Amino acid sequence: MSHVNYDALAPTYNQRFVGDKDRPATARALTDLALNLGAQTVLEVGCGTGRWLAEMHTLTKRGYGLDPSRGMLTQARARQVDLQLIRGWGEYLPFAAGMFDLVYCVNAIHHMDRQRTFIQEARRVLRDGGALVIIGMNPHGQRDVWYIYDYFAGAYEADLARFPSWEIVLDWMRAAGFQHVERRLIERIIDNKTSATVLDDPFLQKHMSSQLALLSDAEYAAGIQRIKTAIAAAEAAGKTLIFPTELTIEMVCGIIKSE
């Protein structure tokens, strides 16, 4: 699997959250579950710059973050929140069995080479009564409307290869020993751009999303040129061109039943 160089993305990564009005739904889903579980020790796998850990830190006694990128962990440490941040990979969790009440992963499972192994490892480090939560997109379902997919050749196909379907993830969870396995909608992100305003979209920068970061410079430039050509054609015809973003974010959750 091709990997994004998140060390290169780290210094500007948090720009994607500026003016972000919708994503608190993800924070609410995580905090509500933590409260329901009475979770005191939590682990975020693929914690990145620590945004979600920072949201959770007032609810729990001990928050741990794991990420393979030194650059992203440096940004997480700059938040000055009391967190245990460790460089590592989701397929090899460097923690003792039964250590956590909650393990969660937000928009990161598609970066793992051995996704099923991560789920098995999460089961190992969870206590009885604990839960694993995975949140993100599902390009295998009804295709979301996203102009990135429309203008950048290969981006959608790459996501199909990287992202496991939720049906497969649920099967992996059951096989690993999770009960009360469920899938539910967290939020719909709707953020349409019109005409040339799309060129100011932070997500259009090459190093702001993994979909674009994985493209070659030539592939990225070709996509930008397609957008500019479409804008020019619409303006010449006196029309307003819409660049749609309507993404579905879902959560799958499995709980380990206490004996």
Image (cartoon, rainbow, N blue to C red):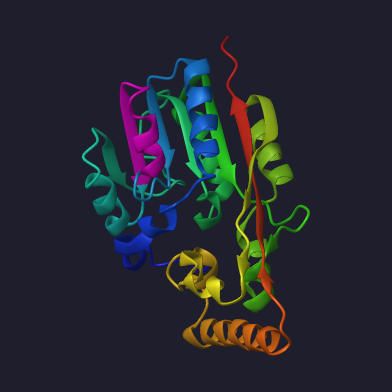
* Residue 83 inside the magenta-drawn segment: no
Q: Residue at (58%, 21%) from the top-left corner?
A: 256
Q: Position of residue 231 (x, y in %)?
A: 63, 83
- Number of marks in picture: 0
Residue 125: which quarter of the image? top left
Tell me: 70 left or right of 109.
Answer: left
Residue 232: which quarter of the image? bottom right
Residue 61: which quarter of the image? top left
In this view of the protein, which residue sits in the foreground, 120 or 51?
Answer: 51
Q: Position of residue 246 (x, y in %)?
A: 67, 56
Q: Is residue 50 above or below residue 218?
A: above
Q: Residue at (46%, 65%) from the top-left corner?
A: 202
Q: Position of residue 248 (x, y in %)?
A: 67, 49
Q: Position of residue 209 (x, y in %)?
A: 49, 64
Q: Is residue 253 above or below residue 218?
A: above
Which quadrant does the N terminus fall into? bottom right
Tell me: 221 left or right of 192.
Answer: left
Residues in magenta? 51-66
In this view of the protein, which residue sits in the foreground, 61 or 51?
Answer: 51
In this view of the protein, which residue sits in the foreground, 39 or 167?
Answer: 39
In the picture as drawn, the residue positioned furthest to the front comes out as: 238
* Residue 57 inside the magenta-drawn segment: yes
Which quadrant does the C terminus fall into? top right
Q: Is residue 138 above or below residue 82?
A: below
Q: Is residue 198 above or below residue 15?
A: below
In this view of the protein, which residue sits in the foreground, 224 or 156?
Answer: 224
Q: Residue at (36%, 65%) from the top-left corner?
A: 9
Tell me: 21 left or right of 43.
Answer: right
In the picture as drawn, the residue positioned furthest to the right comes out as: 142
